[in-house]
Image: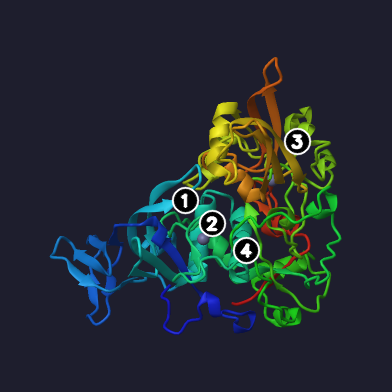
Amino acid sequence: MEVEHGIVGLRDWTLARAVEPAVRVGIFLDGDAAAAVHLTPVRGPAVLGSPGGPDVVIEPGTEIEVRHARPALSLRISGQAARTVPSLRLHAAPVADDLRVSKPGDCEAGILLRDVPAGRGFHWEKRVSQILPGTLELSVGRHGVVLVNVLPLETYLAGVITAEMSAACPLEFLKAQAIVARSWLLAMTEPKHRGEPFDRCNDDCCQRYQGIGGLTATALAAVHDTRGVVLLSPAERRDGSEPEAGGRADQSEPEAPARAKDEGIEGSRDQEACSQLEARAPSEPEARGRANGARRGDTHRSCSILDANYSKCCGGVTETPWAVWGLDKPGIRPVVDAPPDAPDRRFFPVSDANLEEYLDGAWLARTQVYCSPNVVAPDSLSRYLGRVDTVGDYFRWAVRYTRAELEELLRVNLTDAAGLTELRDIHVRARGASGRAYAVQIDWLDAQGQPVRSRLDGEYRIRQALHRTFLYSSAFAVRPERDPGGRLSAIVLRGAGWGHGVGMCQIGALGMALSGQSSEAICSHYYAAAKLGGVYT
Ligand SMILES: [Zn+2]
Ligand SMILES: [Zn+2]
């Protein structure tokens, strides 16, 4: 588990390197404004180092306090006098060599960290304790202590798959989650956190990672069995001619939605001959995928690692990348999240014409949709969700606002609506294949009684603006309630799903695994155009 000196970092990694990279994960970010961080080595000693000072062995159970004392850090070990250091490194002594030989207990040596933020800005935000392996780097931020965990990618993935969902999930689900999370990370197409001292943060903004405290033998097996295996997307279509139905083709409004996130999304950085990858000895699961004939039909002149997005619950149909981020991704197309012969397929694509039936029809009592309560029983879900999630009715949900509540929300959340005196109506102007809105129109009156029209563009922005924290999804119908005079009195948003809906539906993948389907079948269902390949051994 030790991060060797000279190992390839994620930002320098390419397909040609063919080695497991090290990942830098932001645990306490500058924006968290941590005044102090408390660390304790558990199950083994740790080595503490600071610039110009000798390395010190810290015994397990010792309390280390690091305070923000800009321009330096203030370090106090086990109640001793504090001293000032510019930065710190704390390295957990590895008990096991690597994940290939680890039992769960072996992996629990690390540094215990308390009050780590999780779910920043979402309705489930909370603070959790974590055990982190590898090396912790602590530095001085403008607002607080910045803490970065440096560790091998496969160890990081073991922490991701047990944080995104729980380690109690079936093996085949965890294997699919490992492949998808590995692909998304290695693709590195979203330049998040550029200029910060880490590659990815530990939260839903990137991928949830909460250390190795929750590992089980099943979770370790899921990472081990899929080591180095990723989804490879077919050659890029430079002409943008995606043949499948999608947000763009189906919508009446052809203009691009605003970018859901502040940063742009670059093209995939690795464009290499697929033959190189296929010539490499495949890992065992890859060989199985090949034997099954899964995604092995076409020979592509070039390919890249799929930027494999995923989200919690699609609601019945997955979404196009275009409707969420305003771009196509060659390996990701919307799918109905149900068996090939299910009648539920008639809801593709979800549109204004079938939305009411999709949200509330009698079909829901018999649906075979993988993420529905018929497949994943609600009373079992708390076992399978990550520990920061709260179990809710997110397959179908409703939020009701009085007009006054919504007006207050919009005055705060809409930059151009500070003068809003009366809300008149809300209309969805454009939807993607899963019914997720990406353009919303808001009609209101200003102080002079003049009608004003505001527009919310982008799935992320819509979810942010129409909720105190964050709406489960933008796949909703607007149901206005009016008084006898026709004035708006309240609005109910009736919705489906949780998350942006692009790529693998995590609850749906869980449903597939609980129904006995393999990780290869799960990957093939959500990323039909992609294929599996090993990029390092
Ligand atoms: Zn992030
Ligand atoms: Zn789903």
Q: Residues within 10 Å of mark 3 (few under 14, many from 20)?
A: some
Q: Quadrant of the N terminus?
A: bottom left
Q: What kind of residue is marked 3?
A: Thr
Return the mark for residue 179.
4
Whichever of labels 1 and 3 marks the residue nearer the N terminus, that label is 1
Residue 439 horizontal/vertical position (percent): 71, 46
Q: What kind of residue is marked 1?
A: Arg
Return the residue at label 2: 205
Return the mark for residue 2.
none
Residue 468 or 498: which is nearer the viewer?
468
Residue 300 horizontal/vertical position (percent): 81, 75
Q: CA distance from mark 2 to mark 1?
A: 8 Å
Mark nearest the camera among 1 and 3 is: 1
Whichever of labels 2 and 1 marks the residue nearer the N terminus, that label is 1
Say whether residue 249 is visible.
Answer: yes
Mark nearest the camera among 2 and 4 is: 2
Return the residue at label 1: 120
- Relative to 114, 234 lies left or right: right
Q: What kind of residue is marked 4?
A: Ile
Return the residue at label 3: 367
Q: Quadrant of the C terminus?
A: bottom right
Ligand 1 neighbours mark 2 (CB distance < 8 Å) = yes
Relative to 113, residue 90 above or below:
below
Residue 456 or 177: which is nearer the viewer?
456
Q: Residue at x 64, y 73 (%)?
A: 283
Q: CA distance from mark 2 to mark 4?
A: 19 Å
Whichever of labels 2 and 4 marks the residue nearer the N terminus, that label is 4
Whichever of labels 3 and 4 marks the residue nearer the N terminus, that label is 4
